[in-house]
Image: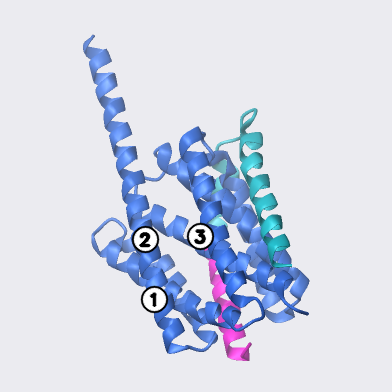
Amino acid sequence: MNTLDRAVGRSTETTFATNKVIKNTYLLLSATLVFSGMMALLSLYLAVPVWTYTVSVIVAMLMGIFVLPRTADSSAGLGVIFAITGLMGFGLGAVISMYLNMPNGPQTVGLALGGTGVIFLGLSGYALSSRRDFSFMGGFIFAGMLVMMVAVLANIFLQIPALQLAIASGFILLMSGFILFQTSQMVHGGETNYIHATYGLYLSIFNIFISLLQILGIFGGDD
Amino acid sequence: MNIWLQIASAAFVGLLLFFLYPAAKHWMQNGPKAKKGDWQAAAIPLLLVVGFVILLIAMVR
């Protein structure tokens, strides 16, 4: 009986910790998305040039590689995640401004935004409600990201529209898989740091939005 | 794109590859293997995403 009590107690503790990670992750993700949106509006208002996007993303990702892992276990991590997402949002404003000036631009941006929301909520809801363990997808997702990075590297210089379309499509699939993977990691205790979890999910949402913008921009253009 | 921005972007993607490779190697070698039905459970929502993106494309064309 005593052993059973202890086992139930441990299980309750684990469930409580898991639910806390999930709750904190979604709270922080919501806050960072709102902040990111405000920064995008600011850069739209300031009409910053398009290269701001590249510079902002590079600086933000460098912070994600070098600063975030050192601060994610302390309260400083919260400031760092807001700095990263704010920078990425600021860069996003420059791209959104470019798309808004295209034919059907507002429709393209609106559909990309709505589509990203539907994809994220649908996949997160599925991973949370099914409670399946998608950690088997880890190898596939990381290998896929390596392939995508090589393609991105090549297309920086080649600038082939068809390759750009393939990269954007590949990113949507990979990032969708990553949402399933990351959410199931939180549910099954593989990810216990809500700042890391938020960063991963934010990057997925960001990449899906940018990729959708590119795809819809290509197919929705007049030419 | 400005040549310096291209070079900076390429250097950055190279750095990402450098940092991503060990994680990818770890997950490919030590990651949990799929059980029966696992890939099907993942493929269904991913196919729905593909269908949804096709629907969005049809809406802008």
Question: Residue B8: image x %, image y %?
Answer: 56, 82
Say whether residue A35 is left or right of residue A165.
Answer: left
Question: Residue A174: image x %, image y %?
Answer: 61, 54
- Disc 2 versus disc 1: nearer the observer: 1
Magenta part of the chain: B1-19
In the figure, the shade used to draw chain A is: blue
What is the chain identity of the residue bearing mark 2?
Answer: A
* Residue furthest top as drawn: A1
Q: Secondary structure at mark 2?
A: helix
Is A168 contained in the magenta span? no
Q: Residue at x 56, y 52 (%)?
A: A119
Marks 3 and 2 close (CB-CB < 8 Å): no
Task: Give the dominant element type of the magenta stretch: helix, strand or loop.
Answer: helix
Q: Label for residue A205?
A: 3
* Alpha-carbon span between mark 3 and mark 2: 20 Å
Question: Residue B28: image x %, image y %?
Answer: 60, 46
Say whether residue A165 is left or right of residue A90.
Answer: right
Marks 3 and 1 close (CB-CB < 8 Å): no
Q: Label for residue A177?
A: none
Say whether residue A49 is left or right of residue A187.
Answer: right
Residue A63 vertical placement versus A70 (above, below): below
Residue at which label 1 appears: A39
* Alpha-carbon span between mark 3 and mark 1: 16 Å
